[in-house]
Amino acid sequence: MLLSDGYNTVGREDTQAIDAAREAGVPVSTIAFGTDYGTLDLDGETVPVPVDRATLEEIADATGGSYSEAASAAELEQVYEDLGSQIGYTTEPQDVSYWFVRAGVVLALIGVVLSLLWTNRLV
């Protein structure tokens, strides 16, 4: 999931990120958040921050993800709801009984040693 205005200011180039996602088999869903006339106030200076929809669409298309747009918080919540129904998870059961067996064996050995010490049979 990539929530962005689409402009790359730090990190790797878009093409490198797309290649890495493809190589890993990870679809990247993108959300263009903002407006064409968006601005940001940095230390009293107004900086324009328009949305680069083309870049975000390219990332989503190239990796097999989906592309969405949100210009407000309400629209963003709707996009999250839509994506939440698409994104799933799987539960994989794992056997952890060996940890309990190991702990039981260690506790039994400690009990044996303490018992031998207590009854003076070790000396």
Image: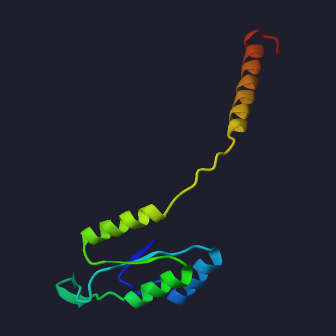
Q: Which sits in the foreground, 58 or 17?
A: 58
Residue projecting furthest to the left: 44
Is 60 left or right of 50, judged from the image as shown? right
Q: Is residue 37 above or below residue 91?
A: below
Q: Residue at x 23, y 85 (%)?
A: 38
In the image, 18: left or right of 56? right
Instruction: Locate residue 53, reporting x and y percent.
Output: 38, 87
Q: x, y percentage for residue 62?
A: 54, 85
Which residue shows up at 58% across the image and 54% down it? Answer: 90
Is residue 123 or residue 69 the one in the foreground? Answer: 69
| Figure check: 123 above or below 9 | above
Question: In which quadrant of the rendered view does residue 80 lie?
Answer: bottom left
Relative vertical location of residue 63 with respect to residue 110 in this rendering, above or below: below
Q: Is residue 76 left or right of residue 123?
A: left
The answer to whether residue 53 of the structure is visible from this angle is yes
Answer with the quarter of the image where residue 10 lies.
Answer: bottom left
Residue 106 is situated, as x and y percent measured from the top left of the image, at: 73, 29
Return the residue nearer the eye: 53 or 121: 53
The answer to whether residue 13 of the structure is visible from this angle is no
